[in-house]
Image (cartoon, helix red, strand yellow):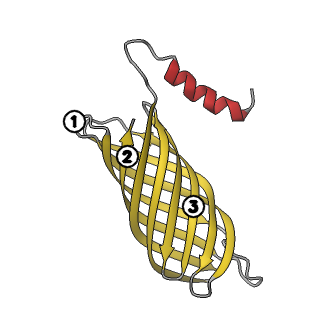
């Protein structure tokens, strides 16, 4: 069995082969996020940092200890805007009302645009790490979350003389609706 079929088969097996008393183990969800933070562009020994905003949407599956999700984000700063498509994996720490988690993700930045010159910069690979908490109030299907996130994308443009890297760090408020 190859890796492309192993992960989906494992996730479905965990969800579908649960005992009759336990019910469904897999819980799908959708959500939105908004964040504020800073963005730093590094090139050699120089760097520039500006305020950034982010807006996003996600679809995912909650399992007992982990969550897997696909996520879209729009990143906006004074000098640049970009779109991010990411796949994230979260490890949830069991708790009663406030449920902490840590996570990581990978994907791509695309539609990177220098807003000062209106130049398109293309796309780049992206990686991120997250730490946050879900507030689980009275088992309602809507779950508020707060999250700190760092996103890194190397070589976001090729100017010939330099290939700058991007680092975005922000705090996000998220709302998740579990189906």
Label 1: which secondary element: loop
Q: Distance between the residues labelled 1 and 3?
A: 33 Å
Q: Given contact means CB atoms under 8 Å apart, are the residues at marks 1 and 3 in contact? A: no
Q: Tell me which numbered mark, 3 or 2, is placed earlier along the sequence.
A: 3
Q: Distance between the residues labelled 3 and 2?
A: 19 Å
Q: Please state which of residues 44 and 144 is positioned toward the viewer in this rendering.
A: 144
Q: Which mark is residue 138?
A: 1
* Residue under the image location 57 percent in, 53 percent down: 86
From this view, report whether residue 27 is shown above or below residue 151.
above
Q: Residue 176 carries which label?
A: 2
Q: Can residue 99 be seen in this view?
A: yes
Q: Which residue is label 3 attached to? A: 84
| Quadrant in which the C terminus appears | top left
Q: Given contact means CB atoms under 8 Å apart, are the residues at marks 1 and 2 in contact? A: no
x, y percent for residue 91? 46, 41
Q: Tell me which numbered mark, 1 or 3, is placed earlier along the sequence.
A: 3
164 vs 176, left or right, is: right
Q: Please state which of residues 178 and 46 is positioned toward the viewer in this rendering.
A: 178
Q: Please state which of residues 125 and 85 is positioned toward the viewer in this rendering.
A: 85
* Residue under the image location 46 percent in, 80 percent down: 50
* Residue under the image location 67 percent in, 65 percent down: 124
């Amino acid at each position: 069995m190859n890796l492309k079929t192993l992960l989906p088969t494992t996730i479905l097996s965990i969800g579908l082969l649960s005992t009759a008393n336990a019910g469904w183990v897999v819980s799908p969800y959708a959500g939105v996020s908004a964040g504020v933070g800073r963005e730093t562009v590094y090139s050699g020994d120089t760097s520039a940092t500006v305020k950034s905003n982010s807006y996003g949407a996600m679809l995912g599956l909650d399992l007992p200890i982990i969550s897997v999700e696909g996520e879209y984000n729009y990143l906006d700063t004074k000098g640049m805007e970009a779109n991010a498509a990411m796949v994230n994996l979260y490890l949830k720490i069991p708790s009663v009302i406030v449920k902490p988690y840590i996570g990581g993700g990978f994907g791509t930045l695309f539609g990177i645009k220098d807003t000062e010159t209106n130049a398109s910069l293309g796309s780049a690979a992206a990686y991120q790490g997250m730490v946050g908490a879900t507030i689980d109030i009275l088992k309602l299907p809507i779950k508020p979350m707060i999250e700190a996130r760092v996103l890194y994308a190397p070589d976001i443009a090729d100017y010939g003389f330099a290939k700058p890297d991007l680092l975005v760090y922000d705090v996000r408020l998220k709302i998740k609706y579990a189906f």
